[in-house]
Amino acid sequence: MEGIDLNPKVLFTIPILGGIPVTDAVCISWVITVGLIIFGFIVRFYFFPRFQDVPRGFQNILEMLVEWVYSFSRDAVHEYSGELAPYIGTLVLYLGFANTVELWGLRPPTTYIVITFAMSIITFFLINLYGIRKKGLLGRLKDYGKPVPFIAPIKALSDLAVPVSLASRMFGNILGGLVVMELVRQVAPVVAPAFLSIYFTLFDGLIQTYIFVTLSLTFIGEAIE
Amino acid sequence: MGIAAIGAALAVLTGVGAGIGMGIATGKAVEATGRQPEAANQINRILLLGLALTESIAIYGFVIALLIIFTR
């Protein structure tokens, strides 16, 4: 095999509370997070004082991104968009970089199903939290018997399938891209990977980010409906 | 590894349904764009969403095949 493992490799162990193993997926996530935090500090302390009323250039891109996230949240989640939009923006930034970090030689952390499953459990928790907040616990349980009461087990099963499908979709796509790029690098390591990774790494990674975020918002919006 | 390989090969056959569905969806999208070229952006967005959702059916088969091959 090419050495692609499905389980994360433990790099070192933090010696408190009986030894917490730290894997390479967590370390690469730290690298991405530190990069995003440094980028945030640079934008806040260098670019903010130079913002103009009519945006141009880099400020334009930033404003477009923030406006897109807010309008997207408002379309799906109407009232709670003020609270959800920052989380969605963070998801877009983190997942966008986590899927495409293969261009810099690291293995994307989303190729381990534990990472994607953790993100989809957060989405599952948010779906139930906003459903209970909008309708109360009894209202949310009554939602399961909406058209016909004996459909409740089928609806519960499809609600449980939501986080599994979100996690598997992103995991399968990004791992597929990784396997294809590894094979191409073994066969033609000179020029072909540069062109093929435009599709398999960049395009696929960004589309999967967009799909994950869209579906999360859609499911939360459905629970509020 | 004998019977596991056959199991994994059967699991990846879910790609057939996904491929047929995505082909039909793209054909309809092209037809709709030909009929009304101003709506091309909307159609493009809806098409990408639909394609990614249908592709996930094939991805489920791929994940099951990986599970069959790599876990005892």
Image: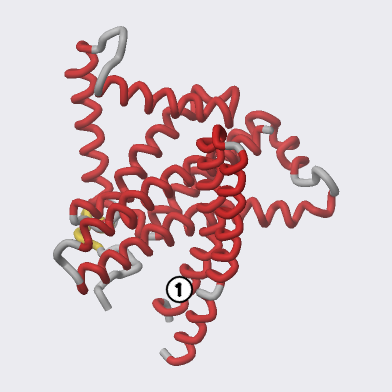
Q: Residue furthest left?
A: A190
Q: Residue furthest bottom?
A: B2
Q: Position of residue A80 (x, y in %)?
A: 56, 25
Would you say A200 lies left or right of A136 here?
Answer: left
Residue sitting nearer the eye, A180 or A146: A180
Quadrant of image for the N terminus of chain B: bottom left
Residue sitting nearer the eye, A198 or A14: A198
Q: Residue furthest top?
A: A53
Quadrant of image for the C terminus of chain B: bottom left
For disc 1, the marked residue is B67
Residue A30 can be seen in this image: yes
Kindly identify the residue that appears in the image at 65 percent across and 33 percent down. Answer: A224
Would you say A78 lies left or right of A179 here?
Answer: right
Residue sitting nearer the eye, A203 or A85: A203
Which image quadrant is residue A23 in?
bottom left
Q: Amino acid at mark 1?
A: Leu
Q: Position of residue B52 (x, y in %)?
A: 51, 52
- The color scheme shown is secondary structure
Under tag 1, what secondary structure? helix
Would you say A149 lies left or right of B55 here?
Answer: right
Q: Position of residue A178 (x, y in %)?
A: 31, 62
Kindly identify the residue that appears in the image at 58 percent across and 39 percent down. Answer: A218
Would you say B72 lies left or right of A156 here?
Answer: left
Badge 1: few (under 14), some or many (20 or more) residues near its Cα, within 10 Å? some
Which image quadrant is residue B33 in?
top right
Q: Position of residue A196 (x, y in %)?
A: 28, 59
Total labels drawn: 1
Which image quadrant is residue A160 in?
bottom right
Residue A21 can be seen in this image: no
| Above/below status of B33 relative to A50 | below
Give the letter of the chain under mark 1.
B
Kindly identify the residue that appears in the image at 41 percent across and 59 percent down. Answer: A173
